[in-house]
Image (tube, coloured by chain):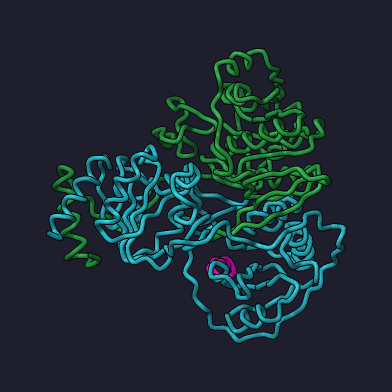
Chain colours: A cyan, B green
Amino acid sequence: MSGVLVILEDRGGRISRLSWEAAAAARILGAQRGVTAAVVGAQTEALAAEACGQGFARVVRVEHALLAPYTADGFALALEQLIRAESPDYVVFPHSYQVRDYAPALACRFGQVLISDVVAIGEGPVFTRQLMQGRFNASYRHTASGPCFVSVQAGAFRAEPADLPAAAPESFAPALDAAQIRTRPGEPFRSSAQTVDLAAAQRIVSIGRGIREAANIPLVEELARALDAELAASRPICDSGWLPIERQVGSSGHTVSPRLYVAVGISGAIQHLVGMKGSQCIVAINKDPDAPIFEVADYGIAGDLFEVVPALIAAVKAGKA
Amino acid sequence: MKIIVAIKQVPERDAPVRIDPAGTWIEESSLQFALNESDAYALEEALQLKEKHGGEVAVVSAGPERVGSTIREALAKGADRAVHILCDDLHSRDALGVARLLAAAIKPEQPDLVLSGLQSEDLGLGQTGVIVAELLGLPHATLILNVEKTETGVKVKRELEEGWFQSVELPLPAALSIQSGGNKLRYATLMGIKRAKTKEVRILTAAELGADSAPVVRMERIALPTKQKSTQMLDGSPKEAAAALLEKLKFEARVL
């Protein structure tokens, strides 16, 4: 077809929000030629109906009984066949955990490399992605012939429905054999009962590596109490077992958007930022004035958290008295 | 079980990284380097599997001579031997180019399990392990926190988004990308450091492995990110900054 193919992802029976952002990125690449959307699964009727009327030139249902539940083998095989049949110039994915699991292998089958976690697309096209935990931006170009595989980061492209008439979905039946699916996935589960609802919190005080050791956590806990806020953390804190994983904010934890988010000793790696950058007001306290967290903060204090936090607690308490 | 762990040396976490004058890579000369974090978890998982089930753990790492210190660290923690793929152009290879090197070195080893960290802290591509699996024709799973041996293969705990998990069963041989946080990392003991000096480190070159290095994706420039938001930095003593912040939160942002 020589155009742009975007893979829309199923999230609980609906097309995921990140997929719409991937569609927006696909439109940048396919402004002239139009964008074809693919939905993948064992039953894709509802997903296809949701995609129709959203401005895609075509909607393709990649359907096979072996495509549920998700497996890397099943998805890579099915999409390999679709891409060989369609020969698109670009294949665009949401940068979800699922895509990270199969898209690199899929690209490899075409001798290609997925340009992953893209935050911007410029003339050329030049793809921007982050390096060094968000400290730098790097620009990438696809230099080979053949399809170019791109995945887009959450929150980087604005999902907007385009204005094109709806076409009836088409069907694509991949040839799959049960023996080709080598892994056996189980049902999703949560590890423990949830005792805190970060998503509903109006104020969050969140801690990162800057806290140095578990013994220092009560200091920030006191700030959270003074601000009437929930305590949260970046991944390394939960990895170390200092706070339970249910308090983790970021791509592997919760996505939050409170009115106030205070990041204490968090450098601002991309995986953390995607989980909190939608907060209404962001405060960052970090000793490194160049830390990427300050890129998304409304207010910043570049200083030692062990001096700033006690001062802040005292000021909050004085204000209440 | 024979386990190969692919590890990468990256700039130390808090290292002051600067862009080189050409704007195409970082200044390496003044940097300290360390073992990539999720690779350390991959190594830990491998060592624990060996302790439970016996077998061998070998590490493989690609990069220039300095990578030798990170390889020694892995050996000191308990890996039995290592393969160092000597190459000075690691960052100009794309993920496929690096994966081809690793796969070429791993293939003749015929391991039961290939482990790698989920993503590197410098480039953060997060796909080398998956491509190695594809090149070796192995089933794979990513974002793995725990590996259990079963009668027919392995059962792994895979992290999904938003606090969900799932179990996945795979036959062996298989490849797994390990997420950080699944285990407690060990430190090298003095005895381990001593022993590491006598362990085998086989040096291979990229040329010997015959892996094609022509990239299909090229990194052209590195730059500082442009600010998307205007951040008000609050200066002064901690006390002054704290007072100024509260003032702003109450009367400007109105979130208190």
Res A112 seen here: no
Please identify the quadrant where the C terminus of chain B is shown: bottom left
Q: Quadrant of residue A214?
A: top left
In the rendered structure, which segment of residues is drawn in magenta? A21-30
Q: Main secondary structure of the magenta part?
A: helix
Residue drawn at 52 percent across, 79 percent down: A161
Res A13 seen here: yes
Percent from the top left, x then y, of residue A56? 62, 78
Q: Quadrant of residue B181?
A: top right
Going by the image, does A248 lie left or right of A281? Answer: right
Is residue A78 a member of the stretch shown in magenta? no
Q: Nearer the viewer, residue A235 or B241?
A: A235
Q: Nearer the viewer, residue B18 or B164?
A: B164
Going by the image, does A310 lie left or right of A261? Answer: left
Please identify the quadrant where the N terminus of chain B is shown: top right
Percent from the top left, x then y, of residue A115? 60, 53
Residue drawn at 65 percent across, 39 percent down: B116
Going by the image, does A225 lie left or right of B157? Answer: left
Percent from the top left, x then y, of residue A281? 30, 62
Q: How many marks?
A: 0
- Location of residue B186 with respect to A267 vertically, above or below: above
Percent from the top left, x then y, of residue B97? 68, 40
- Location of residue A191 with respect to B32 vertically, above or below: below
